[in-house]
Amino acid sequence: MKIRSCIPWGYRMLGLVALSGMSLAVQAEDKIVLLTSWYAQAEQGGYYQAQATGIYKKYGLDVEIHSGGPQVNGMQLLLSKRADVIIGYDLQLLEGIQRGFQAKAIAAPFQYDPQGLLTHANVTSLEGLKGRTILVSSSGQATWWPWLKGQYQLNDAQARPYTFNIQPFVADDNVAQQAYVSSEVFQVQKAGVKSNFFLFSEHGYPPYGGILIARPETIADRKAAMAKFVRASMEGWVSYLNNPAPGNTLIKKDNPKMTDDLLAWAVTQIRQHHLIDGGDAATEGWGTMTETRWQKTRDFMVRANLLDAATDWKQAYTTEFVQDMQVKP
């Protein structure tokens, strides 16, 4: 026996339309895998904020954030299609372009690199580094160390490996070490060591900080999704620097070792040093990139023998997603 529905035909049709709409909405969400450059911390706060507050969802994006770390090769994972977008650095990207890597920067959330040098209080300027031991990571050897060495007439005999442990610095007044203004500086202060910090960008170091990098094929095939991702991410940064609490909750979930006081310190430093809203971002909008700025980094790398002068450096970036975006508070 057939059972006749007691729901009027018109209502049944409305229900079908609603279900169809829900299905389309789910299908319309673009999945993007973002690989960061380090463990979850304030330097990735804008992305976690965009996830926590629903900004990515608002743009129809399903963003999955994976943490990087010292043993994670982000470029390798990008090129092997295990990530859609990575947070990287323009010097490493330019070197990759020289080697034929298919990768391209799509935005520069950090207008300035948070990298600098931490010294004991008896060093009052970068000119006072001669004769001192300087702790440099393996990545630093191919990025900021050639710049610092050339700028202040230092030599490779001064460099020793930095293992992301502040104890060698704490124990020896003759040691200086690389540091993020938003991280190691805080740790040293908590250890009660009187110190000075010199942010490289404030002394002429030209690169951007963490930039967003994607494969050219992703940019071409998923142009709308990339545009939405860049805009949503920068809106996430605006929101995070206004009220970081939602993003910090997710950061601590991904990185249980992260503390509230370090997160608060890092956000303060990002604001005070205008790492995100400074430079061209002040007028052109957060995340912007310019040819002039990229050329400064290229020229430094050529002078430091880090890049062949014949390298087509303009292949390292596209401004199509940031040139008219104008995301600001």
Image (cartoon, helix red, strand yellow):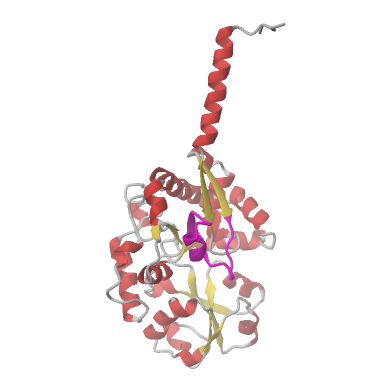
- 48 above or below 257? above
20 falls in the magenta region: no
Q: Residue at x 28, y 76 (%)?
A: 309
Residue 234 drawn at (x, y percent): 45, 50
Q: Residue at x 30, y 71 (%)?
A: 311
Q: Residue at x 58, y 13 (%)?
A: 12
Residue 37 drawn at (x, y percent): 53, 64
- 321 above or below 69? above
Question: In the picture provided, is 262 more to the left or to the right than 294?
Answer: right
Classify the position of the N terminus by image quarter. top right
67 falls in the magenta region: yes
Q: Dividing the picture into quarters, in which one does residue 256 lie?
A: bottom right
Q: Nearer the viewer, residue 54 or 238?
A: 54
Question: In the picture provided, is 22 more to the left or to the right than 125?
Answer: right
- 195 above or below 270? below
Q: Nearer the viewer, residue 178 or 309?
A: 309
Residue segment shown in magenta: 66-86
Residue 48 drawn at (x, y percent): 57, 51
- 304 above or below 36? below
